[in-house]
């Protein structure tokens, strides 16, 4: 058997594999619908008896080709694109939860996800308890109830830059018959493959490094195929009991390892419709072609900037798992030996105003809501992305009010450091 290609080769070569005479580059199938010669063929698609495309709200060939590449990068068995990272987080949990369900999530996650889980999903009758990943197994396992359906965490948290102990939480989840869902947005599959550490489902906001150029909002869900739904059938009725909207078909029996993604596509995407546009998927694919090169440069640059900041007397604290003095250095060495990502969290001595004055003084580095693309940028979560949270909630989510999130890009690092220096008044 041919050797499996390495990550850099998958980034460039996987996904679209043209046959003789076909376009070399992935085509954008900018079409809502797909044509069939007879009505029976179409009917079989609607019954999930055949696979094929019929309407882009559910599936599109451009999207699926790109999802396939991400699936290969993550080492999963099935994947789908969504219109945003938020949709990916929501679908990954909603696919196995319904009103009356409960799940637990790290409190050290992206602010949008925190809000989705803690506020919006509550309105649907799905209850989330947040845990501090630094607590003991016993303290966290005490939160697991008979109606608990999954555990959720981020490989590297946005914006705190804390590293999640994936293997430990996978063990904990599996002890209780639960899947572990990991948001791998910041690490990307170049720096960490959560499935190899026991994660069952991996999600991404492809808006960040995977796209890498700040062109397209998007998301992705990858299934490892490893979780045995039927072994816990009473806990996951949506996968293990007949779906009336498909003539009583049972996903886990009909689709085996593809059950999770098939259900998320055929049922949740059908009904909620957060599909990615094929054009965005095309841009995403273009971004992924250089992901391995960009991540290497992001990490090299961020390490230099982190070293500079850690030695600067105006800096009160810094969180970057690549620094040997960092609280998460050893977890970083375990899960992210090639480097973490380009994002650094730090605080300046002084107050909120000091942080704002520093950011306003930057010239090349811009203030944007975005993070994790080619251009260096900054954000003050307490004033921007997390402004709905109270000071207590901020602290509970591991975000100091003075935290500045610096997303180090792939420019020449000397220019990045020079801009930071001048903004610090040096
Ligand atoms: C941005 C982000 C999301 C949300 O993704 P969108 O594409 O903005 O919807 C989820 N998780 C993490 C870690 C993120 O950084």
Image: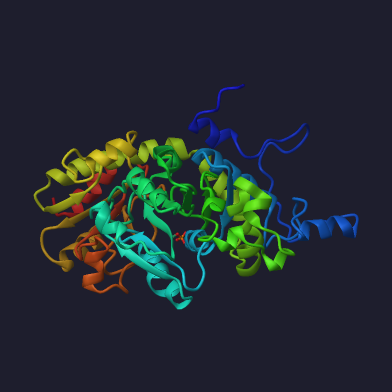
For ligand 1, the image quadrant comes to: bottom left
Of residues 147 and 5, the one nearer the viewer is: 147
The quadrant in which residue 270 appears is bottom right
Of residues 387 and 36, the one nearer the viewer is: 36
Can residue 412 be seen in the rendering of this structure?
no
Q: Position of residue 75 (x, y in %)?
A: 51, 38
Of residues 144 and 397, the one nearer the viewer is: 144
Residue at the image point whose x is 36% and y is 66% from the top: 114
Can residue 204 be seen in the rendering of this structure?
yes
The quadrant in which residue 299 appears is top left
Q: Is residue 57 left or right of residue 50?
A: left
Residue at the image point whose x is 52% and y is 44% from the top: 224
Residue at the image point whose x is 55% and y is 38% from the top: 72
Of residues 76 and 168, the one nearer the viewer is: 168
Q: Position of residue 104 (x, y in %)?
A: 37, 62
Residue at the image point whose x is 49% and y is 33% from the top: 7
Q: Position of residue 177 (x, y in %)?
A: 44, 53
């Amino acid at each position: 058997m041919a050797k499996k290609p390495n990550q850099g080769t998958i980034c460039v070569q996987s996904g679209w594999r043209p046959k003789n005479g076909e376009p070399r580059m992935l085509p954008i199938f900018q079409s809502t619908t797909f044509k069939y010669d007879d009505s029976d063929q179409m009917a079989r698609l609607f019954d999930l008896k055949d696979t094929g495309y019929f309407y882009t709200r559910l599936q599109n060939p451009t999207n699926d080709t790109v999802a396939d590449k991400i699936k290969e990068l993550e080492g999963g068995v099935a994947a789908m694109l969504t219109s945003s990272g938020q949709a990916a987080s929501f679908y990954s949990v909603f696919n196995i939860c319904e009103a009356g369900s409960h799940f637990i999530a790290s409190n050290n996650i992206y602010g949008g996800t925190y809000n989705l889980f803690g506020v919006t999903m509550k309105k649907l009758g799905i209850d989330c308890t947040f845990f501090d990943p630094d607590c003991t197994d016993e303290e966290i396992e005490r939160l697991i109830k008979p109606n608990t359906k999954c555990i959720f965490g981020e490989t590297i948290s946005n914006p705190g830059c804390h590293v999640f102990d994936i293997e430990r939480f996978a063990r904990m989840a599996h002890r209780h018959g639960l899947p572990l869902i990991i948001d791998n947005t910041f690490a990307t599959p170049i720096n960490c493959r959560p499935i190899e550490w026991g994660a069952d489902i991996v999600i991404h906001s492809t808006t960040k490094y995977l796209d890498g150029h700040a062109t397209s909002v998007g998301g992705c869900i990858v299934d490892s195929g490893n979780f045995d739904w039927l072994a816990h059938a009473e806990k996951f009725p949506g996968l293990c009991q007949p779906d009336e909207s498909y003539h009583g078909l049972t996903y886990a029996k009909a689709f085996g390892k593809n059950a999770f993604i098939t259900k998320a596509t055929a049922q949740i995407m059908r009904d909620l419709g957060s599909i990615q546009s094929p054009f965005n998927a095309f841009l995403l694919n273009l971004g992924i072609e250089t992901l391995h090169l960009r991540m290497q440069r992001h990490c090299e640059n961020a390490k230099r900037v982190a070293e500079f900041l850690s030695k600067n007397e105006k800096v009160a604290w810094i969180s970057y798992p690549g620094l040997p003095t960092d609280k998460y250095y050893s977890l970083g060495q375990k899960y992210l030996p090639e480097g973490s990502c380009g994002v650094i969290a730090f605080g300046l001595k002084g107050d909120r105003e000091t942080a704002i004055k520093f950011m306003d003084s930057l010239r090349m580095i811009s203030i944007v809501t975005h993070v994790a693309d080619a251009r260096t940028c900054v954000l003050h979560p307490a004033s921007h992305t997390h402004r709905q949270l109270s000071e207590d909630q901020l602290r509970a989510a591991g975000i100091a009010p003075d935290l500045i999130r610096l997303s180090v890009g792939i420019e020449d690092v000397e220019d990045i450091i020079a801009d930071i220096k001048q903004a610090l008044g040096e």
